[in-house]
Image (cartoon, rainbow, N blue to C red):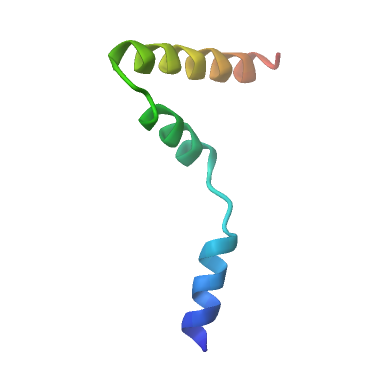
Amino acid sequence: MFATLKRTAKLLRVPTQAERDMAYLNEAGDRYDLEARERTLGRRNLNRTLGL
């Protein structure tokens, strides 16, 4: 019974921002795509820091 509850809790867990960012980066097709995605994430993080 506890195992079922534990499995259900894992399914309902929302991924963290870091996990979503890593998944986004892992989808890159080549080095240039990866660099563009890294720049995108860097800009997004900078804008969050500045409060924009």
Q: How many marks?
A: 0
* Left or right, 28 with reference to 42: left
Q: Is residue 36 left or right of residue 46?
A: left
Identify the residue at horizontal 58%, vertical 51% (top origin): 14
Q: Can you give x and y, in whole percent of width and height, for residue 37 in the image? A: 44, 17
- Residue at (50% x, 85% y) in the render: 2
Most distant residue in the bottom direction = 1
In depth, the one of 42 and 49 nearer the eye is 42
Q: Is 21 situated above or below 45?
A: below
Which of these two is toward me, 35 or 50? 35
Return the x and y of residue 35 as percentages of the image width and height: 36, 13
Q: Residue furthest right?
A: 52
Q: Is residue 20 above or below residue 52?
A: below
- Name above or below for residue 49 compared with residue 32: below
- Image position of 49 (left or right of 39): right
Identify whether 21 is placed above or below 46: below
Q: Quadrant of the C terminus?
A: top right
**Residue at position x 62%, y 14% in the image:** 47
Q: Residue furthest left?
A: 31
Identified at 60% across, 61% down, the residue is 12
Expressed as whole percent of the image width and height from the top left, the position of residue 46 reads 56, 14
